[in-house]
Amino acid sequence: MAACRALPSANDYSIDELISVCISRQVQDGDVWAQGINTPLVAAGLILGKLRYAPRARFTSAIGQALVQDWGPLGLADIESLWVGKGLIHLGFAAGAAEILPKFQPKEFFRPAQVDQHGNLNNIAFGKNYGKPRMRLPGSGGIPDVTPNYDHTYLYVPRHSRLTFARKLDFISGMGHVPHRRRGGGPRYLITDLGEFDWAEGRMRLTSIHPGVELKQVKRKTAFDLIVADELGETPPPDEEDLRLLREEIDPLATRKLETLAGGARKELLREILRLEAAP
């Protein structure tokens, strides 16, 4: 008799899976989401949200500037085949910024290198001297264009630390909750490896803490005074269907884990994913 396949346990999940599941819960039917170039945690979460809650959700991808309704398994070496190959239309970057952004006003998850209590972002550099920074960051892309004009900004930080959640930013490349601004509203939601947050009254607020995390741990890893919701909850864990979809259909190569790793562990997983993709 054939052996029965064991279902994944809802109590046995990794932090990357919890983050992707929390992202999936933000997806609503009919949404248009913008998908960045190298954000597999977000990609996995958006696809999961489409499968579980929002069958009419669509994505605009920075890869090929495509508008996508279909989906496929995530990967590394051939990820263009997902976004470009399944694109309904393809536009250049300028046309995408000028046409898709104003017309569809897509929601988007950004990963900030620094963020302050008001949700202002820095993805430019660490250090006060722009010409000779301590570290040059990936850059701001379209963040300076989107954040002053739209209130569909969401954030994710796979490794919560005082370096990221800073009292004062070295540079500002994305606008947060600024008093008396005429347009845009700052970020709506943030997910990290410690909890979930919003910006009640324009300041970052902890609304949900992940299982096994203590409040003092979140405060210790945040450089500014953190507001805590009166009804602080515990983040609901993934269920069995969430885990099955992530592990077996959406991201069987576990590309989402790359964003939670650094150094040798990240290099090792990169090599393993590329090896699996090249296997016949």
Image: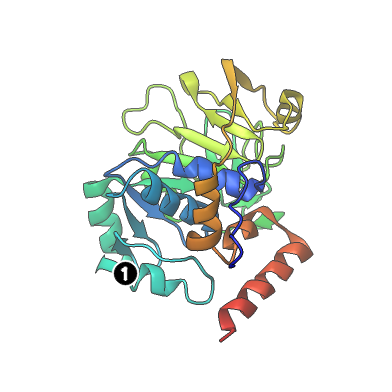
Residue 55 is left or right of residue 249, and the answer is left
Quadrant in the rendering for residue 222: top right
Q: What residue did someone put label 1 on?
A: 86
Q: In the image, what residue occupies the spot 66% across and 31% down?
A: 167
Q: Is residue 26 above or below residue 135?
A: above
Q: Where residue 155 sits: x, y (%)?
A: 51, 41
Quadrant in the rendering for residue 148: top left
**Residue 261 in view:** yes
Q: In the image, what residue occupies the spot 58% across and 31% down?
A: 235
Colour scheme employed for the rendering of this structure: rainbow
Q: In the image, what residue occupies the spot 64% across and 79% down?
A: 275
Under tag 1, what secondary structure? loop
Q: Where residue 90 sits: x, y (%)?
A: 27, 68
Q: In the image, what residue occupies the spot 28% across and 50% down?
A: 101
Position of the N terminus, as image quadrant, is: bottom right
**Count of labels in the image:** 1
Give the amino acid at mark 1.
Answer: Lys
Q: Is residue 223 above or below residue 77?
A: above
Position of the C terminus, as image quadrant, is: bottom right
**Residue 111 in view:** no
Q: Is residue 117 above or below residue 50?
A: above
Quadrant in the rendering for residue 213: top right
The residue at the far bottom in this view is: 280
The residue at the far top in this view is: 230
Q: Where residue 22 sits: x, y (%)?
A: 52, 40
Residue 53 is left or right of residue 263, and the answer is left
Residue in the foreground of this view, choosing between 27 and 168:
27
